[in-house]
């Protein structure tokens, strides 16, 4: 494969920071490009990821592993993985000394001769991206769902075919390091407080989200949430053609609900009937928003309306988002491990009809949980907490007058306790309102462990 960036990085001093899926693919790209490569990771890669360690040795990269100190050298580029903060002292020092900071999204854009459809937001990214990808797939358009779903975007870029469409879930961490990235279609689904431990404030976080459209021109499209005041404010700076979505009001163009139907109105005023919200197989008002957003995004990307309709009717959701696991003695177990912030878990509670025994807690992203507790609204009877945030959530729950709280050491104990406390007709819902880090490497691992614990419970019954 011809690498577009070969000349740019050839013989340049490149430091790759973080050797997860993204960093490992970046290592491959830089080796193909002829860069002089150094790598850093705070883990013992030789032990934890022998395949990547072998790749490092084969390439001949200089390795600073297991937290080994990085010397103060003159780097031309520092390629940082999304999960790694750019505030690491040696990264800050490297930038001061002239290094250009880059990341996997920017690198993928440089490498791949494809059209990018980029979707971001605090909540709903995975469902909307997957649903949009299904619309492209059902229409027979050569496309790939990538980004924070499955394969890293840079790994997908190394395998890309010209004229392919990348339907890409994009995080604020990836957007921090873009410079030229220009998607054909961009979308911001919503903005609520998240990752404040990294971005410092909601305002900073929102500004990073807005970078998704900063390089777009009038020939591109932007899909924003017309019901979200922060997104509406951000969109005023966008030069792309706007095709927003709303479940609360009628729009001059975009997707919305009118007279009990989902409707798409094109920029030239054509009004196209889609389906009734009741025909969606994914529950909750938040999923109606996701469906409206996906319809607008797909239309902007050239998907014929007939395939948008077909996919809206058939799509059954994604793993780890309100995913039914099992029913044991009349008690339902639901996996919503994708609920990695309070807003996401509030939506899961809203979409669950039965009495809820809620398992929550995890990594501390400096979130406030008072609104999360108030959203229980009589539907949550028991709160079972684990992870670093358990004491904070318990304290804030008691401040809100909710006292049916238990703290446990691990997921197995949480599942067993929830089952002991549950009655027939209840739902045990894992929706942590927190990231998984500290106890798990990712929300998928957490959700899979929950499902394993439920299966073990079922075997004993």
Image (cartoon, helix red, strand yellow):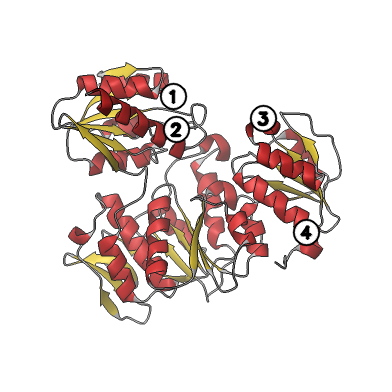
Q: Mark 1 points at which residue?
A: 389
Q: SS for tag 3? A: helix
Outermost left residue:
424
Query: Between marks 4 and 2, how big is the CA–CA gap?
Result: 41 Å
Query: Which tag, 1 or 2, sits closer to the chain's start?
Result: 2
Q: Evaluate whether residue 415 shows in this view.
A: yes
Q: Quadrant of the N terminus?
A: bottom right
Residue 252 appears in the rendering:
no
Residue 329 in picture, x, y percent from top left:
16, 29
Q: Mark 2 points at which residue?
A: 367
Residue 293: which quarter of the image? bottom left
Near mark 3 (Cα within 10 A), the count class, few <14, some 14-19 or many ≥20, is few
Front residue of 341 and 62: 62
Q: On the rendered image, what quadrant is the C terminus found in?
A: top left
Nearer the N terminus, badge 3 or badge 1?
3
The location of residue 149, given as percent across then percent down, is 48, 51
**Residue at position x 32%, y 60% from top?**
291
In this view, 349 is above or below 101: above
Q: Distance between the residues labelled 4 and 3?
A: 27 Å
Q: Residue at x 40, y 47 (%)?
A: 123
The CA span between labels 2 and 3 is: 34 Å
In the rendered view, would you say 170 is above or below 223? above
Tell me if mark 1 has few (under 14), some (14-19) or many (20+) residues whose alpha carbon lies within 10 angstroms of its own.
Answer: many
Q: Name the residue under label 3.
A: 47
């Amino acid at each position: 494969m011809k690498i577009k960036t070969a000349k740019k990085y050839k013989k340049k001093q490149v430091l790759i920071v973080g050797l997860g899926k993204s960093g490992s693919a970046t290592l491959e790209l830089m080796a193909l490009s002829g860069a002089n490569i150094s790598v850093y990771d705070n883990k013992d890669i030789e032990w934890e990821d022998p395949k990547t360690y072998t790749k490092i040795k084969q390439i001949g990269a200089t390795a600073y592993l297991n937290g080994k100190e990085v010397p103060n050298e003159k780097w031309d580029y520092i390629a940082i993985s999304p999960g790694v903060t750019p505030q690491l002292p040696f990264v800050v020092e490297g930038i001061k000394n002239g290094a250009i900071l880059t990341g996997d999204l920017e690198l993928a854009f440089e490498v791949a001769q494809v059209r990018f459809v980029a979707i971001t937001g605090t909540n709903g990214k995975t469902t909307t991206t997957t649903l949009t990808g299904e619309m492209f797939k059902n229409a027979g358009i050569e496309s790939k769902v990538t980004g924070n779903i499955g394969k890293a975007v840079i790994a997908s870029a190394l395998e890309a075919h010209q004229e392919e469409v990348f339907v890409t879930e994009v995080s604020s961490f990836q957007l921090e390091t873009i410079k030229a990235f220009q998607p054909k279609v961009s979308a911001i689904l919503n903005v609520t407080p998240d990752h404040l431990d990294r971005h410092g404030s909601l305002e900073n976080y929102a500004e990073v989200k807005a970078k998704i459209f900063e390089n777009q021109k009038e020939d591109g499209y932007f899909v924003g949430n017309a019901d979200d005041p922060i997104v509406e404010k951000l969109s005023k700076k966008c030069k792309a053609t706007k095709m927003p979505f709303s479940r609360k009001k009628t729009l001059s163009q975009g997707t919305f609900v009118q007279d009990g139907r989902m409707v798409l109105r094109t920029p030239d005023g054509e009004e196209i009937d889609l389906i009734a919200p009741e025909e969606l197989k994914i529950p909750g008002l938040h999923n109606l928003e996701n469906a409206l957003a996906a319809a607008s995004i797909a239309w902007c990307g050239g998907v014929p309306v007939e395939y948008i309709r077909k996919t809206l009717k058939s799509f059954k959701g994604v793993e780890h988002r309100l995913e039914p696991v099992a029913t044991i003695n009349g008690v339902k177990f639901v996996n919503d491990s994708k609920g990695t912030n309070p807003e996401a878990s509030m939506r899961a509670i809203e979409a669950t009809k039965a009495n809820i025994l809620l398992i929550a807690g995890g990594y501390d992203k400096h979130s406030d949980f008072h609104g999360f507790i108030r959203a229980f609204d009589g539907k949550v009877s028991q709160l079972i907490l684990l992870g670093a945030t358990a004491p904070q959530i318990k304290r804030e729950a008691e401040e809100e007058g909710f006292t049916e709280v238990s703290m446990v050491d691990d997921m197995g104990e949480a599942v067993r306790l929830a089952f002991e406390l549950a009655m027939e007709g209840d739902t045990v819902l894992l929706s942590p309102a927190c990231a998984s880090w500290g106890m798990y490497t990712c929300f998928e691992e957490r959700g899979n462990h929950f499902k394993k614990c439920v299966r073990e419970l079922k075997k004993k019954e």
